Image: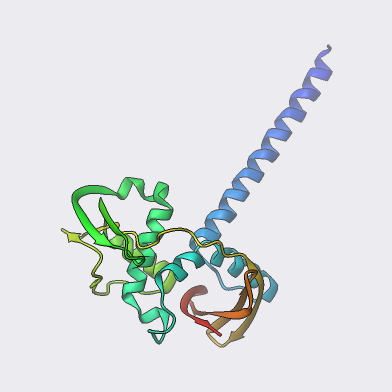
Amino acid sequence: MNKKIISIILIVAASVFIIFSIFKNTYAYDYKEYDYTLFYKEDSNELAEDIKKYIYDIDYLIYNNSDFSIYDNLNNNYEFMVNFAIDYINTHKDKYQDKIVLLEAFKYTDNHHHDKVTNEYIDIDTIYDITNKYFGVKDFVILNNNINIINKYISLSSTTNKDIDLNIYSIDIEKKASVVQANIKYTDDSSTNYIYTFKIDNNILKLYNVEVR
């Protein structure tokens, strides 16, 4: 095999490696963007797709931790937001493993009336980071009955018993000044509308409320 052929093979191999690396990094960036931040976009179709991907990661946490009949809006329900944040951490524990500490065991009862115990705790600021990221709310007083606080560390008292398999059937969005509403239907209940209301804060969408109609 002459040097010219060897050079061509090396160039092709290097090109394939570079293309694969670019694709891998691009995919990782997109996943992280949808996992953490929902940016406002003027293009309604793009915004609808972004909201669909965003909701897919959190909707079962919303339904496991909320009672749509007892609050005016999700954004004011601090107990819900704490439970949401704790369950989010437990669901994505690999991302928070370095922040979790082991303290005294805490016994509690979850939303399904199951007795549980945990000795895993995380700093309260991490809870506020999550509630601020999704709902634009932080630094509120935590009064949940199912948690224990030790020196600004909060017990990871999970309220979610199991995942709910929610598959989005359709999504329509409507823009109103600084508010975006997403009308979502799920495949197992296409006759029910789930209205997700987002407020636009510095070009980022924060979840304000969820209504069932």
Q: How many marks?
A: 0
Q: Nearer the viewer, residue 41 or 112?
A: 112
Does residue 43 appear anywhere in the picture?
A: no
- The colour scheme of the drawn protein is rainbow
Residue 46: give x, y in percent of width and height: 67, 69
Determine the residue positioned at 50% across, 82% down. Answer: 211
Determine the residue positioned at 53% across, 67% down. Answer: 38
Q: Nearer the viewer, residue 184 or 139?
A: 184
Residue 156: give x, y in percent of width and height: 30, 57
Quarter that holds the C terminus: bottom right
Residue 110: give x, y in percent of width and height: 32, 63
Q: Is residue 41 above or below residue 163?
A: below
Q: Nearer the viewer, residue 27 or 100?
A: 100
Residue 2: give x, y in percent of width and height: 84, 12
Q: Is residue 151 above or below residue 176?
A: above
- Horizontal side of 43 relative to 97 (left or right) equals right
Determine the residue positioned at 38% across, 69% down. Answer: 132
Determine the residue positioned at 40% across, 59% down. Answer: 161
Does residue 165 appear anywhere in the picture?
A: yes
Q: Is residue 172 above or below residue 130?
A: below
Q: Nearer the viewer, residue 130 or 171?
A: 171
- Horizontal side of 82 relative to 41 (left or right) equals left
- Horizontal side of 49 relative to 9 (left or right) equals left
Quarter that holds the N terminus: top right
Residue extending furthest top? 1
